Image (spheres, rainbow, N blue to C red):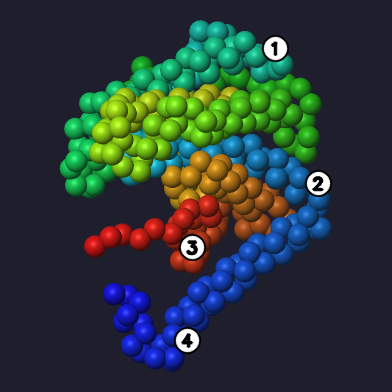
Amino acid sequence: MATASLVVGGTQRKAKVRLGPLVERILSYVVLALIAVWLVANIVSDPDRFIGSALVGLQNGLLYALVALGYTMVYGIIELINFAHGDLFMLSTIVAAGLMVSVLGVGQLTAASILPLIIALIVCMAFGGLINVSAEFLAYRRLRSAPKLAPLMTAVGLSFIFRGIAQQDYVNGSAQKNWPVTWGGPVIEGVFLYKLVMVLAVTVPLLLAMTYIVSKTKMGKAMRAVAQDQDGARLMGINVNGTISFVFMLGGALAGAAGVLYFLCQTQTYYDTGTQLGLIAFTAAVLGGIGNLTGAVVGGIAIGLVQAINEGGAYGLGSNWSQTVVFLILIVLMVFKPEGIFGRPTTEKV
């Protein structure tokens, strides 16, 4: 129907159809060129300052990528934007803080802190996975065939529940809580080397493991089948409920791991942490192409780098404008490429 209506208009209307994508492509190249010029200007003006900002951006971007993967995996299989995911990450930071400081007695973080780190990762990943699977079983599963607004509002409700739990005095309280944890070891351009190595050593294997599970394993094939057609997957003998629960478990485990890393990087907990970081991680998932694992990673790292260079670079607007810059880039991308960097254009059948 769309093709027929375009042909009726003759040559002039065809020219308009061709002009739209051409203008969009030119404008997208202009935006990319401006970003490239901005980066080069920061490098030339103060290379050391740029390197320090880039290291901070890489560190933060990998954390964003871990949380963004939880968003994108759940959306990819049941098309649910799980707004409670950011606050699950926030609860994981509190669990990690209590475990590492109050139970394991970690005070200074050095290379000798590997064992407490491993214990905290196991506990918090199990915690995040259990909470997420419970949320799927008790809330989201019953709303799977309901209008999309119902599970979305349920996710918002769970988010407020998680935040309410965190605000209790016996959990964390309503004020920001600083923990007596310090970093040791060498420092590169204001960045603790051990901190960056820790984030890389934990995040990169997890990201590779998620990619392997989705693309190479039998459960990964089941996940892709359920994402494409739940009824068809059920007819092929796939346990749809079990597969969806498994995806929620993976997403929750990634949020738990991100919670441990975030606490160790910031050494503080706050009940509202998940709101801001969750929005940034969701933005990263959309930027890369929500539902695409590679896109979530690239989007997270890209946002982390842009944020850090904007705050610490020679030609940045400062921390007050960080969120504005990030979301302005997102808006521009959504205008010209709404499916995201690695997403594929989709059409709805009517």
The residue at which mark 2 appears reads as 48
The residue at which mark 1 appears reads as 112
Q: Element type at marker 4? A: helix
- The residue positioned 32% from the left and 28% from the top of the image is 238
Q: Which mark is residue 337?
A: 3
Q: Amino acid at mark 2?
A: Asp
- The residue positioned 49% from the left and 67% from the top of the image is 336
Please identify the residue farthest to the front as the structure is shown: 236
Q: Residues within 10 Å of mark 2 (few under 14, many from 20)?
A: some
The picture places residue 276, in percent across and down from the top left corner, at 45, 42
- The residue positioned 23% from the left and 26% from the top of the image is 138
Which is nearer the eye, 345 or 134? 345
Q: Report whether residue 176 is seen.
A: no
Label 1 vs label 2, nearer the camera: 1
Q: Residues within 10 Å of mark 1 (few under 14, many from 20)?
A: few
Q: Element type at marker 1? A: helix
Q: Which numbered disc flags the more N-terminal residue, 3 or 2?
A: 2
Which is nearer the eye, 219 or 232? 232
| Residues under numbered marks 4 and 1 in contact, where contact means CB atoms less than 8 Å apart | no
The picture places residue 206, in percent across and down from the top left corner, at 56, 28
Q: Which numbered disc flags the more N-terminal residue, 1 or 3?
A: 1
Label 2 vs label 4, nearer the camera: 4
Q: Which mark is residue 15?
A: 4
